[in-house]
Image (cartoon, rainbow, N blue to C red):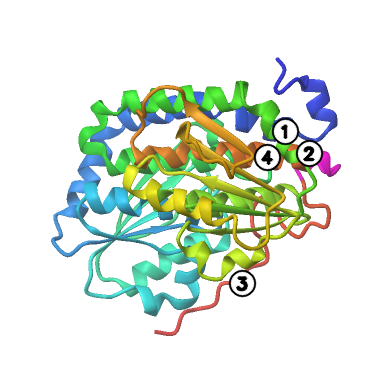
């Protein structure tokens, strides 16, 4: 089987086999994620009922790096559907400044996202939460049943949801693990209406199929232009996608492409100064009509100041925005996807862009870090006892 006109042997020689397969395999993975959440709905529901019986329960979404960005896209989902105050706090912040985020008397549902769960901060954040809060519920969403986080020992209530094995990426950069855990978290946040959500998952698969099979040539052409900087913009749940997008391109190019992120409105307040004639600006548009008004205005304002080398945008349905050099529309029909689901598929362009740019720079996408500065699992972090 070929992926983007590359045979398995060619991908192997390029050091790109895992990354290509993991990006390309996401639509099939998403269906399996839905099936697994559905199969385990009973035990997940019983666990959540125990936690949410606390009137003043606080939900904390946590993870490190890519896994932390999942929480940024899900805070609204849990706030609206679980109806509890929800915040996203990276494990890397909890480990150093737990006293700024945790309260002993506030019951806490800690939802931890981790691909392997072997990063030092993963278990440390869970243990610190146990020590800082009298009542803790641990929901661990991970891709590795054998990881340290999945096997974390605690006297608190704990539930581990392990994604299908395909989600446990072998490549350095998280791709299917990210979108798979994001979808799992979204479905768990809306567990009470899980039976109504298959049409949303089907639309995700359709949209991903278009990007992977019909748009890949245009994304490759975008990767081939000579940009040296890239900026990704997203609003609301797409803000987390913008952060993950810039990280994915920067990781897969071993830092040769310097990347930034922001919200559409936030970009006006100073960060827009980063744009120059060697910058790619990529807009991740919402499909919420109210939000789109602000996003269209920002695109129009991009004509002021330094001009970017290229401006591209991903949108659910085609928008007439003359300042864009490239547009990728997911549907030719009226919009069908709920905004909460949009981040799951909207990460694909950055993953593909990073893959093709990595190859163009002569790197191996599976292991792009020539210097070894970054690795699949973070190493060398010493966890020190917290003095309360």
Question: Callout 2: helix, strand or loop?
Answer: helix
Q: Tell me whether the residue at label 2 lies in contact with that at label 3, contact meaning CB atoms closer than 8 angstroms.
A: no
Write down the residue under mark 4. Answer: 353
Question: Callout 4: helix, strand or loop?
Answer: helix
Write down the residue under mark 3. Answer: 382
Q: CA distance from mark 3 to mark 1?
A: 40 Å
What's drawn in magenta, residue-wise? 358-367
Q: Residue at x 45, y 42 (%)?
A: 343
> The N terminus appears in which quarter of the rendering?
top right
Answer whether residue 91 is magenta in the image: no
Give the main secondary structure, helix, strand or loop, of the magenta stretch: loop
- The x, y position of residue 17, in whole percent, is 74, 30
- Mark 2 is surrounded, within 10 Å at the Cα level, by few (under 14), some (14 to 19) or many (20 or more) other residues, namely some
In the shown orientation, is residue 76 left or right of residue 51?
A: right
Write down the residue under mark 2. Answer: 224
| Of residues 290 and 115, the one drawn nearer to the viewer in this rendering | 290
The numbered dot on residue 220 is: 1
- Mark 3 is surrounded, within 10 Å at the Cα level, by few (under 14), some (14 to 19) or many (20 or more) other residues, namely few
- The x, y position of residue 315, in whole percent, is 48, 37
């Amino acid at each position: 089987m070929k992926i983007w006109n590359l045979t398995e042997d060619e991908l192997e020689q390029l050091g790109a086999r895992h990354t290509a397969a993991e990006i390309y395999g996401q639509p099939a993975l998403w269906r399996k994620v839905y099936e697994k959440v559905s199969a385990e709905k009973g035990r997940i529901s019983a666990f959540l009922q125990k936690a949410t019986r606390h009137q003043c329960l606080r939900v904390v979404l946590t993870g490190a790096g890519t896994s932390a960005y999942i929480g940024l896209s899900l805070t609204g989902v849990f706030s609206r559907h679980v109806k509890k105050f929800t915040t996203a706090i990276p494990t890397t912040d909890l480990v150093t400044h737990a006293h700024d985020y945790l309260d002993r008397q506030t019951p806490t549902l800690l939802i931890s996202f981790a691909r392997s769960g072997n990063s030092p901060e993963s278990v440390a954040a869970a243990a610190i939460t146990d020590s800082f809060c009298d009542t803790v519920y641990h929901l661990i969403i991970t891709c590795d049943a054998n990881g340290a986080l999945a096997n974390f020992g605690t006297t608190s209530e704990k539930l581990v949801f392990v994604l299908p094995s395909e989600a446990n990426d072998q490549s350095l950069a998280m791709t299917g693990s990210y979108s798979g855990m994001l979808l799992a978290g979204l479905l768990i946040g809306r567990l009470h209406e899980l039976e109504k959500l298959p049409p949303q998952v089907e639309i995700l698969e359709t949209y991903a199929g278009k990007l992977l099979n019909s748009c890949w040539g245009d994304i490759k052409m975008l990767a081939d232009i000579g940009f040296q900087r890239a900026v990704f913009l997203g609003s609301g749940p797409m803000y987390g996608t913008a952060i993950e997008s810039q990280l994915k391109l920067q990781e897969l190019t071993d830092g040769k492409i310097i990347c930034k992120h922001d919200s559409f409105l936030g970009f006006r307040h100073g960060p827009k100064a980063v744009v120059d004639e060697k910058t790619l600006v990529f807009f991740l548009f919402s499909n919420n009509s109210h939000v789109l008004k602000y996003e269209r205005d920002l695109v129009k304002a991009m004509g002021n100041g330094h001009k970017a080398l290229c401006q591209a945008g991903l949108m659910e349905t085609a928008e007439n925005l003359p300042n864009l050099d490239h547009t990728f529309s997911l549907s030719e029909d009226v919009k069908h996807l709920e905004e909460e689901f949009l981040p799951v598929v909207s990460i694909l362009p950055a993953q593909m862009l990073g893959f093709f740019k990595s190859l163009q720079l002569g790197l191996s996408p599976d292991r792009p870090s020539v210097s070894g500065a970054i690795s699949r699992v973070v190493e060398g972090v010493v966890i020190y006892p917290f003095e309360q």
